[in-house]
């Protein structure tokens, strides 16, 4: 074992990963934890992916409980935690991944749209943390990581309820970190911006994603150079590395903090490297001419 692994002290711990089997990001986080020697209890609403992740995790030499549950259903999430308690007794790590939103102007959204956005971006996290806290106490402490978004930190037009729910998750997590500090239970957040984890299935804005996809990866990479200060989008592996840091002993005195894994977009605060104009919050003559020229 190397010095870094020894200080991380993850081997043999138990992690609950809510939304830990499906699509790109949840699966990546589960496998990253398993590669670090962490036993897994994961739930997801994609039943086929729940089944398929089991041999992948077991091949890494750790235990896994893979459970089919939709976090939109409080009873299903509760049943998952019942199984976690039955199978493991106590836990060390909790990762709350699922997210959902529907892009629209607020006035065009329905009560049902709003209720789902709130449940999938805030409500289920309350339920997950409530059930997890007693199991973390049995281990003498641990780490909770909730996924938020850059939209929790800015006025995200056409994502008003989603952004509001993520902002609620952010402040809830900070408050919970204060409440649980004496129990040595740390609560932190990861806030992605543009990344494959947010856009891989086009669920946030399907019509726009379909248009973007037609442009091809080279064009998308050039667009990222305008928006992302590091000139590239963070990868899912970058997010997984941030997660491993936050759940490990390498961050044992960090709690109530949001880790922005975004290539610098939150630091930029709206300053964009416009073609022909350089860094400005709004385009100047060169970019305006390029964008709006009718010639």
Image (cartoon, grey):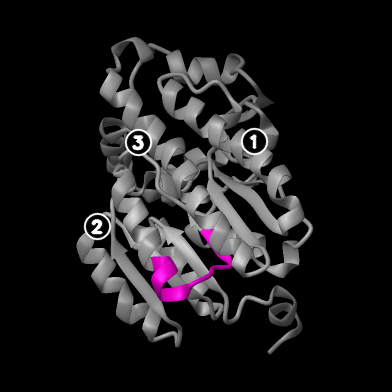
Q: Which mark is residue 204?
A: 3
Q: Mark 2 points at which residue?
A: 46
Q: Residue at x 72, y 82 (%)?
A: 6
In the image, taking residue 57 as reference, residue 108 lies left or right, namely left
Return the x and y of residue 63 as percentages of the image width and height. 42, 81
- Real-space CA distance between mark 1 and mark 3, rounded to the nearest whole angstrom: 19 Å
Q: Which of marks 2 and 1 is in front?
A: 2
Q: What percent of the width, then of the height, locates residue 249?
A: 72, 69
Magenta-colored stretch includes residue 3: no
Question: Would you name the residue on which mark 1 appears?
Answer: 266
Q: In the figure, is residue 8 to the left or right of 207?
A: right
Which of the two discs, 2 and 3, labels the residue nearer the N terminus?
Answer: 2
Residue 272 vs residue 35, the one in the foreground: 35
**Residue 211 vertical position relative to residue 142 in the rendered view, above or below:** above
Please identify the quarter of the rendering in which residue 56 is found.
bottom left
Q: Give the range drawn in magenta.
A: 84-94
Please name the residue shown 35% across and 52% down the image. Answer: 77
Residue at the location (54% across, 37% down)?
169
In what quadrant of the picture does the N terminus appear? bottom right
Labels 2 and 1 touching (C-beta < 8 A): no
* C-alpha gap between disc 2 and disc 3: 18 Å
Q: Distance between the residues labelled 2 and 1?
A: 32 Å
């Amino acid at each position: 074992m190397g010095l870094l692994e020894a200080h991380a002290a993850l081997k043999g711990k138990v992690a609950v990963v809510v939304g830990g089997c499906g699509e790109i990001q949840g699966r990546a986080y589960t496998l990253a934890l398993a590669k670090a020697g962490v036993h897994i209890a994961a739930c997801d609403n994609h039943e086929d992916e729940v089944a398929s992740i089991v041999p992948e995790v077991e091949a890494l030499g750790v235990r896994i409980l893979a459970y089919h549950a939709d976090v939109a259903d409080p009873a299903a999430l509760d049943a998952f935690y019942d199984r976690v308690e039955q199978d493991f007794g106590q836990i060390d790590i909790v990762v709350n991944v699922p997210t959902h939103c529907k892009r629209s102007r607020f006035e065009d959204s329905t009560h049902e749209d709003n209720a789902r956005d709130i449940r999938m971006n805030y409500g289920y996290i309350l339920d997950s943390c409530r059930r997890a806290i007693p199991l973390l106490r049995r281990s003498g402490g641990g780490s909770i990581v909730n996924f938020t978004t850059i939209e929790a930190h800015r006025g995200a037009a056409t994502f008003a309820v989603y952004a509001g729910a993520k902002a609620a998750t952010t402040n809830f997590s900070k408050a919970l970190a204060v409440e649980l500090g004496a129990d040595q239970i740390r609560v932190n957040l990861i806030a992605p911006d543009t990344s494959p984890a947010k856009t891989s299935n086009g669920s946030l804005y399907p019509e726009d994603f379909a248009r973007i996809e037609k442009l091809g990866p080279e064009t998308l990479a050039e667009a990222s150079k305008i928006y992302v200060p590091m000139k590239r989008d963070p990868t899912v592996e970058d997010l997984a590395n941030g997660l491993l840091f936050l759940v490990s002993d390498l961050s044992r005195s960090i709690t109530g903090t949001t880790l922005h894994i975004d290539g610098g977009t939150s630091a930029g605060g709206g300053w964009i490297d416009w073609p022909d104009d350089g860094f400005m919050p709004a385009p100047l003559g060169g970019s305006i001419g390029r964008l709006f020229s009718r010639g």
